[in-house]
Amino acid sequence: MPDQYKINYRRWGYPEGEDVVLILHGGMSHSGWQAPLAIQLRAMMPDLTVVAADRRGCGLNDNRGDLGSVHTVIEDVTRHIEYLKKSFKRVHLAGWCQGAQYAAVAASKMPDSLSSLILMTPGFFWNERFRSVLSITENNILAMIKELKLRPDRDHACIPVPMEATDFTLVDEWLDFIEKDDLKITLLNIKSSRIMDEIQEMSWFAMLQNRLPVLAIMAEHDRIVDNNKVRRFIGHMFSGENKNRIVSLASGHAIQFERPEEVAAEILTFIRKN
């Protein structure tokens, strides 16, 4: 990256070709969580390349829990798109959960470099339960810092990420995977918590400007996303004659864990039409 920060990523497939899907992960996770979907996509379309990058401050990247700034965390995505566009004819940008926010914002900045936008359980709006958990956790931590007269460095990760494995899935195999995952983000610094809020708001305006073909995949049993609010927000994109598609799967939030075959089939059908 321009500031010499090294972004780690995983690639399934060839370093060049016709189509590449770039997947952006969620808030607590990292690129490795997209492996089941990437493997399934490649099994069904061997000439497809799938790339998943760790967000700044996440996964294998340095400075865990530090997203840098709004500008840099979005620029990381646009730079990756530019890099892939040099080697592939079509770049399809996908985002899962919070990654859908980053995908929407990045897509609004360089629509001519992308062929489509794929939103998987898009976290444009959190449900009431999850919003309450986020708010209570942050307020309690900040109140404690004030009461104890602490002065944590803005770069020090001290804000807990209030998410549990059961927020994502109820499948035992994947619950065990999430619990044992040492690369998941459990703490953020204060500024990164604010960055996340700002990116979410930016994604709302970005989606209103979107002109790319859109595939949205919702999870019927999502414990994180407010599906009804998301549908009201982007529902207008799926009316009339266009290539857009919205589908709902019988799954928890982590559709790439529970329904990789169905998700892959939807994505491949969609990108072949675009």
Image (spheres, helix red, strand yellow):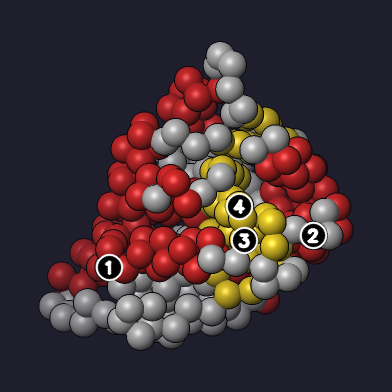
Q: CA distance from mark 1 to mark 4?
A: 29 Å
Mark 1 or mark 4: which is in front? 4
Task: First in sequence, mark 1 or 4: give its number.
Answer: 1
> Can residue 109 be seen at all in this image of the molecule?
yes
Task: First in sequence, mark 2 or 3: give its number.
Answer: 2
Residue bearing the label numbered 3: 88
Q: How many marks?
A: 4
- What's the mark number on residue 69? 1
Task: First in sequence, mark 4 or 2: give its number.
Answer: 2
In the displayed structure, would residue 98 be above or below residue 204? below
Other-residue count near label 3 (Cα within 10 Å), few / some / many at <14 / 14–19 / ≥20:
some
Residue bearing the label numbered 2: 47
* Residue drawn 28% across the image and 62% down it: 70
Q: CA distance from mark 2 to mark 3?
A: 12 Å
* Residue drawn 54% across the image and 79% down it: 8
In terms of image quadrants, where is residue 268? top right
Secondary structure under tag 4 reads strand
Tag 2 near tag 1, CB within 8 Å: no
In the displayed structure, would residue 62 be above or below residue 227? below
- What's the mark number on residue 90? 4
Q: Amino acid at mark 4?
A: Arg
Q: Is residue 209 left or right of residue 20?
A: left
* Residue drawn 67% across the image and 30% down it: 247
Q: Amino acid at mark 3?
A: Phe
Tag 4 near tag 3, CB within 8 Å: yes
Task: First in sequence, mark 2 or 1: give its number.
Answer: 2
255 or 134, which is in the foreground?
A: 255
Q: Residue furthest top?
A: 240
Query: In the rendered view of the protein, which quadrant contains the C terminus?
Result: top right
